[in-house]
Image: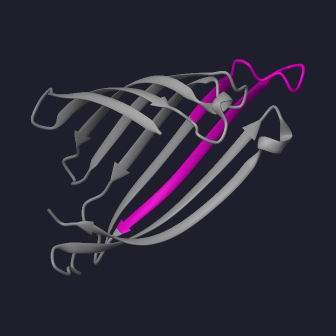
Amino acid sequence: RWGELKLGQTVRQSDVQQLRFGSVIRTEKRLDSDVNSSNSIAFSVDMTRAIESGGTFGLGTTFKNVWSDSGTVDQASVALRGNRSFAQIGAFQPRLSASVEQRNYHKFSSVADGRDDTTMSLGIDVTFPNVSYFGFLPQASLQMRKTWSTVDIYDRNEYSFGITAVSRF
């Protein structure tokens, strides 16, 4: 069971640039194991700017703290992200994204030095704006994610590919 409160505000700085501020407060009550229940708070800021040649680019950051009795849940993190969407190129419209996140697990005590994870993500989404079905466009996505951890069992390589429909509106 969980509850979440999100607050956000977009500030338009000019005709081509805006800032978005956000905060999230969340509580999770785990029914399988109460030790894994948690409370968290996160703050984020994102800047988006339109580009004269078409498309946009954006930069953002998020700070998050999670409190839990579990050493594998309790953590603090900071993430930096960037993206670039392009104007239509032929029959498709690409969007590139990248992020890096650093997590520190405060209470992780299974190893002497504790646990820190660094995750890097890269992605590309390709939308096909000339193909529309009831106001929806097909989109193909490829995501790659790698996690380096000071505790080897948490090292990860993840790859995903998906096809979905996105709203044209």
Give the residue drawn at x 53%, y 33%: 29
Q: Position of residue 126 (x, y in %)?
A: 38, 67
Which residue shows up at 90% across the image and 19% down it? 112
Overall secondary structure of the magenta section: strand
The structure's colour scheme is one colour
Q: Is residue 141 magenta?
A: no
Residue 92 spot, x, y in % from top left: 31, 73
Residue 50, position as x, y percentages in the image? 21, 43
Q: Is residue 15 left or right of residue 140?
A: left
Snapshot quadrant of residue 37: top right
Q: Is residue 145 left or right of residue 88?
A: right
Does the segment drawn in magenta span residue 109?
Answer: yes
View extreme (right): residue: 112
Q: Residue at x 53, y 69 (%)?
A: 161
Task: Tell me what residue is drawn at x 38 percent, y 35 percent.
Answer: 59
Camera-side residue of 134 and 108: 108
Asked whether, in this view, residue 15 is left or right of residue 73, the answer is left
Q: How many marks?
A: 0
Q: Is residue 25 above or below residue 162?
A: above
121 versus 24 height, above or below: below
Q: Is residue 57 left or right of residue 32?
A: left
**Quadrant in which the C terminus appears:** bottom left
Q: Quadrant of residue 109?
A: top right
Write down the region rendered in magenta. 101-126
Residue 86 x, y percent position in the rendering? 30, 57
Q: Relative to 25, say whether 93 is above or below.
A: below
